[in-house]
Amino acid sequence: MILEIENMSLAYGNIEAVRGVSIKIVDGGIVALVGANGAGKSSTLNAISGLLPISAGTIRIDGQSTKELKPHQITRRGIVQVPEGRRIFGRLSVEENLLMGAFSRNDHQAIAEDRDRMFELFPRLKERRRQVAGTLSGGEQQMVATARGLMARPRVLLMDEPSMGLAPLVVEQVFDTIQAINAAGTTVLLVEQNALMALEIADHAYVMEHGEIVLEGPGPELAGDERVISIYLG
Amino acid sequence: MSMRQDDGKTPSLQLRRGLTAGAAAALIAIYLSSVGLIAMMNARPVIANALTLAQMTLLTIVFLAGALSQRPSPQDRTPAFWTAPLAGAVAGLLVAGFAGVILSVNLRPVFIALVPPLARLLTFGQSGVDGTAILVAGSALVASAGAFYQRLPDKVRRLLFPAALSVLLCGMFQEFIQVILQSNALFRWLAPWFYGWDGLTATGALIVFAVALAAAALPLVYRKPAGAGDVSSWRRFVPALFILLLLLLVPIAGGPYIAQVFLLIGLYVLMGMGLNLELGLAGLLDLGFVAFFATGAYITAILTADSPLALAHYTAIPSLSFWLAMPIAVLGAVLMGILFGIPVLGVKGDYLAVATLGLGEIVRIVVQSDAAAPLLGGAQGILQIPKPQVGGFQFGSAVSLFYLTLAAALFAAYCAWRLERSRLGRAWIALREDEDVAQAMGINLVQSKLLAYAFGAAFAGLAGSIFAVMVNSVFPSSFQLLMSINVLALIVVGGLGSLSGVVLGALVLIGLPEALREFGEFRYLFYGLALILTMRLMPEGLLPASRRRRRLVSPIAVGGSTPVARP
Ligand SMILES: Nc1ncnc2c1ncn2[C@@H]1O[C@H](COP(=O)(O)OP(=O)(O)OP(=O)(O)O)[C@@H](O)[C@H]1O
Ligand SMILES: [Mg+2]
């Protein structure tokens, strides 16, 4: 098991945002984490990345607790986040953004190859490689954020709402890309509000509500679950 | 909807524009007169017997009012030309009225500068109804010239502006330039062409204007056709080489005072480059920067001074030469930088400014305290710091110390340039952009931030070390908060993160006030003005860093083209 979260809780001051969450991520699959606004999904990802301290429970990478690890050390262990709201480096060029993603690597040859591979995966970015990333469209920025995350050669890519604010057609493309990335060997933890689509492609999924996991199971199965539908429609 | 149709054509809007521009110009002129600047500027000729700095300033104000009245605004995309002469006439009328008031009412008890000669200066010697008419018409003409200039194509303005600026500089600094010309047989024959006994001659002004115009036009002539690829790399270094040559020759030729000014500029450039790493790259605002400078100076002092406070006096450590003390001083400053960085690691934005300000003051107060007096001399400081020596040669003069500073600055510039392009430099830029994401990319936040303080401090420590031998002594009172603010102001005016910007900023904010000593009391007025003007007109600084130049700009400003990063 690459990543294991056990009974994790975290709080902002007095407000408990996540309570006793357990998530298991085995090599190779797509795991989805869905839930309404404010359910605690981003908080969970940030805790995994070491950007937020947890108040209880453990997070383990390859069986080893991350308690003592700094964010950059977690990244170096192959757990890489593509943050919510894209958060690209707006003043750097597209290409510089990608190279920033490979910051913790120093195999220059392979970095250049990976960059070219990203340009194959996202031809739009190749055309705009010199453009200042802050001037890209929302969809293009999402491509930069994703490609930047992949440049770290992650073992697990934590994607926080990659479809946010995108047109339905672009959302389809994003989901296709996620599947392609996964097929190429990267494990994906996908956080989505676009729940039904996320569940469709997930091997395993968790539904979060008010900081707790309320449901879990194989993705397509949950997609048909009455309770999921009631959470999202009622 | 109908509002949109007569967009920019509304006479009342145009009228208001002209009136405000004129009134603003008059107010500025009246303000400068009241504080005494205009009278003082009158003592400095720009063109001998024709134009003083005061007159030039008044004309420039009206000229700018005319030019600014033509700048399109969102409500008014095509301002009418007549707003400019209107602005000029209003300004002329108001200033003439002000002069009239000075002549008829004794305002001296209020503002000591408001005396009849000033009135004659403001009205260019004109008086009476006819005189006022001439003044108003002349002022309208100057403002129209401003408007005309504003409407010229960008290319032409880029030629005219440096040419006019060159004339101004050659006139204002005639005493220095004359000394330089006279000092060398190579140039001596040139002098009579430009300068008479009392300054730049009219012919001289014309020649300077023409030469500067031609020089500014040169790059246009030699420019490769658009899209023909990059400018070859050596050509980019031509201006830098030219400036370097100037820096090498000017202090020798200009005499000790010029050398002293350049030395000071050099020290500020060193500090500016250091703060640029902290603020320009890593985005860490630091108002306690002077502490690093002080550390460098004090370490140099206690290691080399011939004083009871020197370490050699009461420990087994021998008295060191400057060359050994300087690297130790730099290391000490680095250590101070790290110590300084640790408590403010988690502090961001506005709070960081306050926290660093506090730390800087703490350092100064500790040095000044009685507790530290047995070691650092308290308010009396440490005296008798010897000048650096190489063999028999002593760096005793300002000129030789300037060359030492220049060498240090070149070395530091090279380091800064390499740093910006290094992995660490990229980490700093990423941290400035988004701390969380940068960490998620694998950047070590603590280490990178501390390194930013450490490198910034190293540059300041080097400057402090040279400063100590320059003045032969160190006192806590030399290391005021104002110094940190000066360094901050000069890199902001020059352009954050830009190396050439640091040099230009230091020239403008440190060099100009030093060279124009008589305006000393107005130094901070000038600072404020320079800062406000840059922030309003060129928020990226005078020479923006390439990275900043392509910050997101509104599509109108870039004509719809996409900003493109340098390769
Ligand atoms: N920095 C913060 N300080 C205080 N409370 C916070 C902070 N960040 C998040 N919260 C709160 O924690 C809870 C969980 O937030 P989180 O961002 O994890 O939700 P989410 O599931 O990602 O929601 P969304 O789908 O809207 O992104 C929310 O109630 C939010 O208001
Ligand atoms: Mg979220």
Image: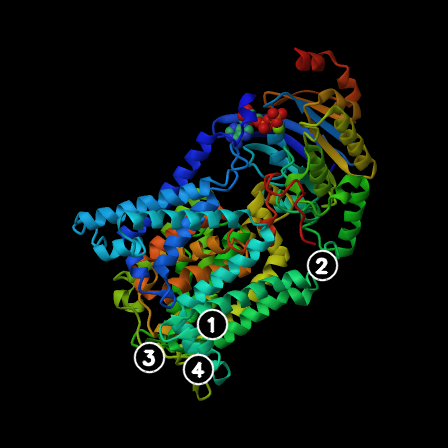
Mark 4 and mark 2 lie on one chain; the one further toward the N terminus is: 4
Mark 1–mark 4 Cα distance, whole angstroms, equals 23 Å
Residue closer to the observer: A77 or B191 = B191
Label annotation for residue B183: 4
Residue drawn 79% across the image and 37% down it: A181
Tell me the quadrant of the picture where the C terminus of chain A can be found: top right
Q: Residues within 10 Å of mark 2 (few under 14, many from 20)?
A: few
Q: Which residue is mark 2?
A: B230
Place of residue B25 in the rendered image (x, y in percent of width and height, measured from the top left): 37, 46
Label annotation for residue B306: 3
Quadrant of the rendered image holding ligand 1? top right
B457 versus A55 height, above or below: below
Q: Is residue A20 visible?
A: no
Residue A156 falls in which quadrant of the image? top right
Q: Amino acid at mark 4?
A: Ser
Mark 3–mark 1 Cα distance, whole angstroms, equals 23 Å
Q: Point out the frontmost of discs 1 and 2.
A: 2
Q: Which residue is mark 1?
A: B405
B187 versus A189 height, above or below: below
In this rendering, would A118 be left or right of B361? right
Q: Residues within 10 Å of mark 4 (few under 14, many from 20)?
A: some
Mark 3 and mark 1 lie on one chain; the one further toward the N terminus is: 3
Q: Amino acid at mark 3?
A: Asp
Mark 3 and mark 2 lie on one chain; the one further toward the N terminus is: 2
Q: Point out the frontmost of discs 3 and 2.
A: 2
Q: Point out the frontmost of discs 4 and 3.
A: 4
Residue drawn 58% across the image and 55% down it: B156
Q: Is residue B495 visible?
A: yes
Q: Amino acid at mark 2?
A: Asp
